[in-house]
Image (spheres, rainbow, N blue to C red):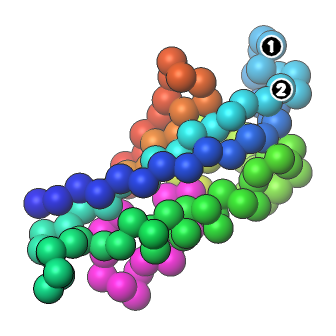
Amino acid sequence: MYEVTIEQDFDAAHHLRGYSGKCERQHGHRFRVAATLRFDKLDNIGISRDFVDLKQHLKEILSRFDHYPLNDIPPFDKVNPSSENIARTVFEEFRSRLRDQGHALHSVTVWESPEQHVTYLP
């Protein structure tokens, strides 16, 4: 089994609705997102999947969040833009891009600071 992980950053502001504390006010983060895929086999040149291709998919997904107030962007206009919900949303969008290619997305991890992160595993 091989695990391949790619990471990208994006900057965004958000606030948590229904939260009692300073996170209920608009604030920003440099979010770091890691997507991990699992592979059983390598291709004929000895790789599981081209990093360039995977990074492009993640970059395209995150570009709609970068430098925007997350609370204004679906699905975060309806659900809180918590790290947990960001991880699940990125996972679902990434998985849908890879569905036809037979690759298994294992997890997505989101850091909102260097000291704390959330991992989503379906």
Q: Residue at x 50, y 77 (%)?
A: 97
Is 57 displayed left or right of 77 in the figure? left
Residue 2 x %, y %: 17, 59
Instruction: Please say whether residue 103 is one of the residues in the magenta stretch.
Output: yes
Residue 12 x %, y %: 78, 41
Residue 65 x %, y %: 75, 53
Instruction: Note whether residue 78 is visible.
Output: no
The main secondary structure of the magenta stretch is helix
Residue type at mark 1 is: Lys
Is 33 displayed left or right of 63 in the figure? left
Give the farthest residue toward the front. Answer: 45
Quarter residue 46 falls in: bottom left
Quarter residue 48 falls in: bottom left
Secondary-structure class at tag 2: strand
Residue type at mark 2 is: His
Q: Residue at x 17, y 81 (%)?
A: 45
Instruction: Please say whether residue 32 is one of the residues in the magenta stretch.
Output: no
Q: Residue at x 56, y 57 (%)?
A: 90
- Placement of 114 over or under 70, stated as above or below: above
Which residue is label 2 attached to?
27
Secondary-structure class at tag 1: helix
Residue 28 x %, y %: 79, 30
Q: Residue at x 21, y 72 (%)?
A: 47
Query: Neighbour class for label 2 at 10 Å: few (<14), some, many (≥20)?
Result: few
First-in-chain label (1 vs 2): 1
**Distance between mark 1 and mark 2 Cα atoms:** 9 Å
Which residue is label 1 attached to?
22
Q: Which residues are magenta?
A: 90-105
- Placement of 72 over or under 80, stated as above or below: below
The answer to whether the residues at label 1 and label 2 have Cβ atoms under 8 Å apart is yes
